[in-house]
Every structure is written in structure tokens, then in C-alpha cells.
Amino acid sequence: MPLYTQEQINTLAAKIKDVRFGMFTTAGEDEKISSRPLTAQQIDNEGNIWFFTSDDADFADDLERHPGVNVSFSNPAESVYLSVAGQAYLLKDRAKARELWNPAVRSWFPGGLDDPHLALIRVRIQSAEYWDAGAGKMKQLFQLARAVLSGRTPSQMGRHTTICL
């Protein structure tokens, strides 16, 4: 079992807390890669990302055959980009669903917590990478303009970090 630091988990959670949707990427039966938007409900203290889904969604069966997934998040307004790789598990856990339930989920599951297709996806994070410009928009534009005028590649505009959990 990987060793997580709470600081690493908190950093990832902070980077995606204001991102409404992540692009959840799976491999299908024919190894074809496909993505769909899902809303991360929580990153728990053990390094799992939780999502609501339907157990009859087209990609639900893919998770059992090919549990390796990627979820990418982007917040262009803050120049933050995050890519998470992990193992996904489709679960019927009513206690966890109750813990994560919020009014927005009802639009997808009108039967509420009793909806027969209500399921959760738990992604056990194995690694994550993020790019964080850490500079204001004006500073970024200045660096890009300077690079164009000088004919040189822009200097590192922020920070790229890889975390293996």
C-alpha cells in the first residue's frame, strides 16, 4: 500500500476544489480510450477520489476489465492543470453515498439514495501531476511577449510537480 502524506493529499484536494468537472478517461473493451465529464465529490484522507455514477453507464463495465483510469482537471482562470492516474472501483456503498449526497446529484438520480442504479466510483490515486503557473495573468503575458520579441522559448512559467502516492 502506498504511503501518503496528508500534505500531498491536501495539495491535490485544494487544486481541484474549485474545478466543477474532471475528464474521466477509461479504456473500453477494444482498448479504445474515451473520456467523459464527472464531478469529483471528495478526495478523502486516504487518497481516493469519489464520484457518483450510474451502474448502467456505458463505461461502467470498462472499469472491471480495465481499472486503470486517468482524470484530468483544469482551471484556466488560475492557470492550474492536474492529471491523476489511479485504479477505479465501481461500488454500491449506500453509507458513502449518503455522506457525499448533495442536491445537485438528485438531477441525475431522481430516486435519490434509493435509485437502483446509483453507484460510486472510488479512484485510488497512484500518481498525480500538476502544472501551476503561480503567476498572475499579466506576468504570464509579459513573459510570453518577451519570448516572442527575443525569439527564445519562454522561461519556465510556473511549477510542474509529480506526486507518486
Image (tube, rainbow, N blue to C red):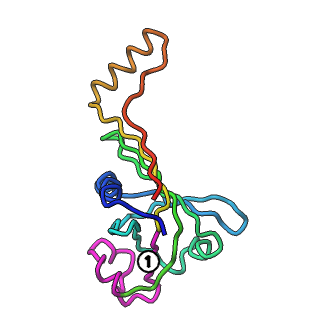
* Crowd class of label 1 (few under 14; some 14 to 19; many from 20; radius 10 Å): many
Question: From what the image shows, is residue 155 above or below residue 87?
Answer: above
Along the horizontal axis of the image, is 59 left or right of 10?
A: right
User: Residue 33: horizontal and vertical position, in percent?
Assistant: 63, 58
The picture quadrant where one finds residue 100 is bottom left
Taking the spot 54% from the left edge, 75% from the top edge, the residue there is 57
The kind of secondary structure element at disc 1 is strand
Residue 53 or residue 44, whichever sits in front? 44
The picture quadrant where one finds residue 94 is bottom left
- What amino acid is found at the position of numbered circle 1 in the picture? Leu
User: Residue 76: horizontal and vertical position, in percent?
Assistant: 36, 41
Q: Quadrant of the C terminus?
A: bottom left
Instruction: Pick out the residue farthest to the right.
Output: 30
State the count of labels. Answer: 1
User: Residue 84: horizontal and vertical position, in percent?
Assistant: 47, 56
Taking the spot 40% from the left edge, 87% from the top edge, the residue there is 115
What's drawn in magenta, residue-wise? 95-123
The picture quadrant where one finds residue 108 is bottom left
Along the horizontal axis of the image, is 82 left or right of 104?
A: right
